[in-house]
Amino acid sequence: MDRRRFIELASAAGTGIAFAGCVGSEGTEDTEDDESEPDAETSEQPSGDDEGDRPEPEGGDGRPYTQYDLDVHDERENGGHPVWIDRNERLYGRSGARVLVSDDWWETTETLYSFEEEGTKEEYVKMVLVPDSGRIIAATGGRGDVGGKIHLIDEDLGGAETLYQFDYGRMSNEFGHATHEDIVVISTYALSDFEANRHANEVILSTDGGRSFEKVLEPELVTEDAANHHIHDVEYDPYAERIWVAVGDHGNSQIYWSDDLGDSWEELDERGAVTMITQIAAFRDCVAFGTDGVPEGIIRWARDGPNDEPDGVDDLVRPHVQIETDPDDDVMELYARRRWHIREDDGRELCLMPFGYSTMHDTAEDSVLLASVDGDEWYELHRTETRDILLSNVMGPLSMDGDRRTLVADSFQAGGYQIDASVPDFWN
């Protein structure tokens, strides 16, 4: 997409969809989970057919609107973890060394591919991506001293080619990946080993739909007076033809961008001046950043056009939208996790972004799903209020029209909890 598309999107016709999804923190080791019976639940949903029937807005003034909820069809805990959906509504997931697939929104699953040495954590599947090319990209391993691998599964499912191996760390299912047409951006994630000078700080890029990858960024360590030096998230911005990268933690924090597919990079500000970010969502008129700290919510940079660039951290409004948490607790309770962003050819777009509680905070328990069609106004569509569920990514909908079906999942803990729902048309 060239930069003129930034202006043409408002009048273009068609139904094509471009996907971007990505998310994380350290969690429990993967386990082979037993399937459990689904537990059905249905919630009331505003019809939206008559403007006069719509509920009065609640929220605003720096808070998410709350008058719309997901139309929940089913909540269940099935074996394995769903992590991706392709444009044909096929869900992909992981369980141990196996790549799982489902054609019925994770009610049932089957093994698509199993890596060698099944049962060893070196071959455990961490993430599955299927960009518009239809190629199946699987990430495995990456715990301990051995870096994770990026594989391309053969079309006949008879084998897999290792395309890239990180020096340290692994691909996360919670953040650190984005796709758009033939562009695939992936980063590595792990806790730093400062004594061994090992950091999960690589960003790799594919411009051929996942057929090959090359490293395009490896930020230098600035300080060991921080929890980590690693990549938090990446985004491909089709309006500016730009790659965004968020790095943490604290004194090592930075936002980078590149307008030439990683040949050169710009930095937002001095390292450490940037709030920790774990999600980047590029909208036509702004870029929204999901936070990894207090106050929890959305930071926003408004842009005047595709060639615009932020001029320092003061250009970012923080917080633009703040999620309600315990007002008496100044410790981070939840942070942004793997978003799902669709961009219609007629100029409309929709982004869903979950915020899950921090496992480092013993009393935190909420998971929240935010949604926006412009990066400015955000709606809180769901809140779990239980530590038994840690929402960490969202898959679908594939379009803003039709049934707008989505699956919001816990693909981080051992449980594998899923919420099957429809997204309300809160934008009409």
Image (tube, helix red, strand yellow):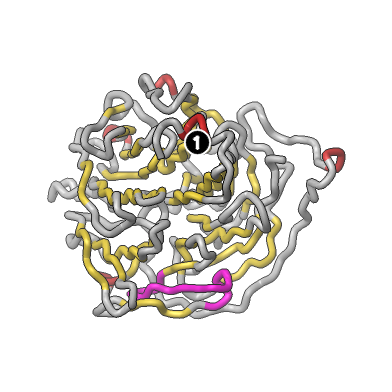
Q: Where is residue 347 in the image (x, y as percent from the top left)?
A: 56, 38
Label 1: few (<14), some (14–19) or many (≥20) C-alpha neighbours in 10 Å:
many
| Residue identified by numbered label 1 | 283
Quadrant holding the N terminus: top left
- Residue 266 visible to an observer of this rendering: yes
Q: Is residue 380 left or right of residue 410?
A: right
The answer to which image quadrant residue 129 occupies is bottom left
The picture places residue 337, in percent across and down from the top left corner, at 46, 49
Residue 2 at x, y percent in the picture: 39, 35
User: Residue at 86% of width from left, 38% of height from top?
Assistant: 52
Instruction: Kindly identify the amino acid type of the residue bearing the numbered disc 1.
Output: Phe
User: Front-most of 149 and 398?
Assistant: 398
Which span of residues is magenta-colored? 94-108
Residue 325 shows up from this direction? no
The correct choice, above or below, for 202 with respect to 322 in the image is below
Residue 101 magenta? yes
Q: In which quarter of the image is the C terminus?
A: top right
Left or right: residue 36 compared with residue 264: right
Rendered position, 234 above or below 259: below
Residue in the picture at 28% in, 51% down? 206
